[in-house]
Amino acid sequence: MKLHNLQPAEGATHKEKRLGRGEASGKGGTSTKGNKGGQSRAGYKSKRAHEGGQMPIQRRVPKRGFTNIHRIEFKVFNLGQIDQLAEKYNLTEFSLETLYINGLIAHTDSVKILGTGELKTKLNFKVNAASDKAKAAIEAVGGTIEIVK
């Protein structure tokens, strides 16, 4: 076998169909685009979601509910998690900066402390929100909590 006698396998290649090159080609005249109408003309582009007069799917399907654009999404931490996080990352202060530095929240996240679980270590908190039960538990251990806006 030499480079000069290499060729593709039988039937692996096909000749390109040349459209609009005369009637003898079998693809002349309308170039397989049918007769008349926008689709046979140059520059044709169908509109997005157009279904040829049929009611489009986004209008057929019923809509339900709504999204409140003023909702504030919080990254939630329970008291039970905080002891483990403080031990793992050697935290003395549970603030937005320390959480961001340790990769626990994104720069734009808001943090809320909830009262599920038990807090054993004394920590200082600087967060966006906290439940009443969480505030009471933090102060019972001897920690402080500051709500930052």
Image: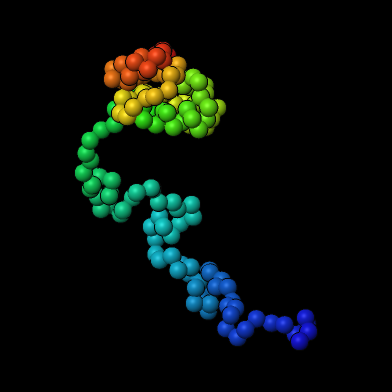
Give the residue at x 46% y 31%: 85
Asked whether 2 or 120 is in front, the reply is 120
Please tell me how many numbered marks the rendered image carries: 0
Residue 101 visible in the displayed image: yes
Give the residue at x 33% y 50%: 50
Q: Quadrant of the C terminus?
A: top left
What color scheme is it? rainbow
Image quadrant in which you'd find residue 13: bottom right
- Height in image: 20 above or below 44? below
Asked whether 12 or 1 is in front, the reply is 1
- Horizontal and vertical percent for residue 91? 51, 24
The answer to whether 29 appears left or right of 139 in the picture is: right
Residue 69 visible in the displayed image: no
- Horizontal and vertical percent for residue 61? 23, 47
Give the residue at x 25% y 53%: 54
- Height in image: 98 above or below 144? below
Q: Quadrant of the N terminus?
A: bottom right
- Height in image: 22 above or below 104? below
Asked whether 35 or 75 is in front, the reply is 75
Give the residue at x 49% y 73%: 27
- Horizontal and vertical percent for residue 128? 40, 18
The answer to whether 37 appears left or right of 106 in the picture is: left
The answer to whether 8 appears left or right of 25 in the picture is: right
- Horizontal and vertical percent for residue 113? 36, 23
